Image (tube, rainbow, N blue to C red):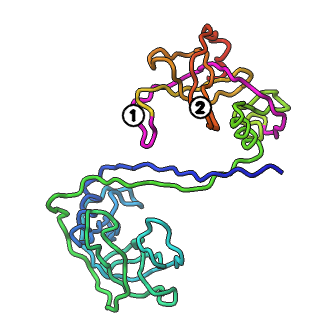
Amino acid sequence: MPDVLSAPLVVEFPFTRSLGPVQSAFLTGLRERTVLGVRTGDGRVLVPPVEYDPVTAEELRELTEVATTGTVTTWAWNPAPRRDQPLATPFAWVLVRLDGADTALLHVLDAPGPEAVNTGMRVRIRWAPQRTGAITDIACFEPYESEPTAGSTPHSGEFADPVTGIVTAARLDYTYTPGRAQSAYLNALAEQRTVGERCPSCRKVYVPPRGACPTCGVATAEQVEVGPRGTVTTYCIVNIKAKNLDIEVPYVYAHIALDGADLALHGRIGGIPYDQVRMGLRVEPVWTVGARHPDHYRPTGEPDADYDAYKELL
């Protein structure tokens, strides 16, 4: 039995968004150790605040300050915190209805164990020592014996130096394990060959193979070696340099229909000025020593392919 391939993969990017008046006031308030909600037309106080009533879609702007104490409405114990979670020690995820609010806020509770947590327990905010205007300005909740307080206080939402935008790092770590078809494809690439699989029904050759025909829905097993040369079917010019990618911009990324394939794969085009890349350009792979896939594709010097030869692969 062949070895099972697997590799750790990370998808990561910064998500930047601007804040409207409600979210700006809420996050700036956290920086100032103030929790703001928004009042709806029927008198409910929503914390965290939203810009539109989730029931009526009415625009909401009436801000109100609520207490920093509250009641746990439900919870779940987390025995093994992950990277970048609020606490490094085991904690409880909790929904807390702050005094004066009618909805619950999701955060974490610092507790010695699940036996110390219960629905209905009283808690209070523990503020972060350094606050910047983010939900993490609430370091966590902690148990706190107190009587619930009713009501809330109108607030203008005005603060000095308000927070107007946030940047959130989105990241997904996972281990990818290809199936039989893609393992064969990757192993062939390590030998500087490209293989696809032919559908037994429509006879199309798919590269990279997926183990089934996306058109007919039937399993594929017949391997077909394609290329190595191919045709640029379409392309884009990249003008923004990617993090951790040592390629100078601008450069061209293209869909390439390898000879004998019925599906275009993508690859970088090199060996030619970016503004001379064109549809129909004939290209071939360039391999580097020890690489498991082509570094880029370069022009072969052949005449351009006729449009009719690749129009079905656009």
Residue 253: give x, y in percent of width and height.
52, 28
Residue at 42% of width from left, 75% of height from top?
A: 108
Residue at 34% of width from left, 69% of height from top?
A: 47
Q: Quadrant of the C terminus?
A: top right
**In the image, is residue 257 above or below residue 48?**
above
Label 2's element?
A: loop
Relative horizontal placement of residue 31, taking residue 97 as reference (left or right): left
Verify whether residue 96 appears in magenta.
Answer: no
**In the image, is residue 37 above or below residue 253?**
below
Q: Closer to the camera: disc 2 or disc 1?
A: 2
Residue 36: give x, y in percent of width and height.
27, 69
Residue at 39% of width from left, 72% of height from top?
A: 105
Residue at far left of view: 160
**In the image, is residue 240 above or below residue 285?**
below
Find residue 195 and report its image quarter.
top right
Which residue corresponds to mark 1?
240
Residue at far front of view: 289
Label 1's element?
A: loop
The region drawn magenta spans 217-246
Circle 2: is it few (<14), some (14-19), or many (20+) Cα within 10 Å? Answer: few
Residue at far top of view: 303
Q: Amino acid at mark 1?
A: Ile
How far is the residue under mark 2 from the one under mark 1?
25 Å
**In the image, is residue 222 above or below residue 103?**
above
Residue 31: give x, y in percent of width and height.
24, 67
Relative horizontal placement of residue 89, taking residue 7 as reference (left or right): left
Name which of mark 2 and mark 1 comes first in the sequence.
1
Residue at 69% of width from left, 31% of height from top?
A: 192
Relative horizontal placement of residue 252, taking residue 63 as reference (left or right): right
- How many numbered marks have been drawn onto this rendered protein structure? 2
Which residue corresponds to mark 2?
288
In the depicted view, which residue is nearer to us: 84 or 138? 84
